[in-house]
Amino acid sequence: MLFGGVAVFFGGSAALYGVWSRDETGTVALVVACAMAALVAFFCLIQYRRRGARAQDRGDADVADGAGPVAFFPDESPWPVLTALGFAMTATGVVFGLWLFLIGLGVLARGVYGMVFQYARR
């Protein structure tokens, strides 16, 4: 709910700012802020629809309703480090050449793929 309101605020601000100021840079920054807040709001909405109201969200819940496993917390993973290395190589490749950019893009793609599908069979 909070991030949805923030997204609406930034969307309205972007529309008004874009019309009145005709400044592309500020308008794009506000649109990106709107999109980022909307992404978080969408994620929270999907999680709420999947899992329903938590015991903390209900006024009639007992203490025992909140007992049990909270969520799945993964073990340590090498994929975030590989993703960061791939991003660093890709960014460095912008400066030093296409060959390093393409190698970094490959490493970055493998790291993101590993993070996304690491627990797919869980």
Image: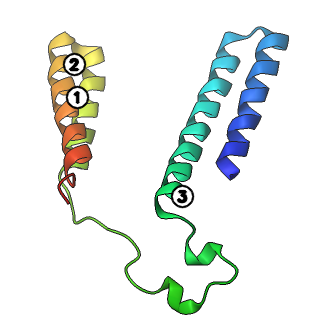
Q: Which residue is mark 2?
A: 101
Q: Tag 3, which secondary structure? A: helix
Q: Is residue 39 above or below residue 13?
A: below
How would you rate the neighbour count of disc 1 (Cα within 10 Å): few for under 14, some for 14-19, many for 20 or more?
many
Residue sitting at 77 percent across and 8 percent down?
A: 22
Residue contact at pointers 2 and 1, CB within 8 angstroms: yes
Apparent side of residue 30 relative to residue 86 in the rendered image (left or right): right
Residue bearing the label numbered 1:
89
- Mark whose residue sits in front, 3 or 1: 3
Mark number for residue 48?
A: 3
Q: Amino acid at mark 3?
A: Tyr
Q: Quadrant of the C terminus?
A: bottom left
Residue neighbourhood size for the residue with mark 3, other residues' Cα within 10 Å, grouped as few (<14), some (14–19), many (≥20) = few
Amino acid type shown at disc 1: Met
As helix, strand or loop, the secondary structure at mark 2 comes to helix
For the point 76% across and 14% down, the residue is 18
Q: Is residue 71 left or right of residue 22?
A: left
Are the residues flagged by discs 2 and 3 in contact, CB closer than 8 Å?
A: no
Q: Where in the figure is residue 76, as x and y percent of width and height? A: 21, 63
Q: Quadrant of residue 23?
A: top right
Give percent across and percent down for residue 34.
Answer: 64, 32
Give the percent coordinates (x, y) of residue 11.
Answer: 72, 28
Disc 1 is placed on an element classified as: helix
Depth check: 59 or 91 in front? 59
Which sits in the foreground, 35 or 79? 35
Q: The residue under label 2 is which amino acid type?
A: Phe
For image coordinates 24% across by 19% down, the residue present is 93
Q: Residue 17 sits in which quadrant? A: top right
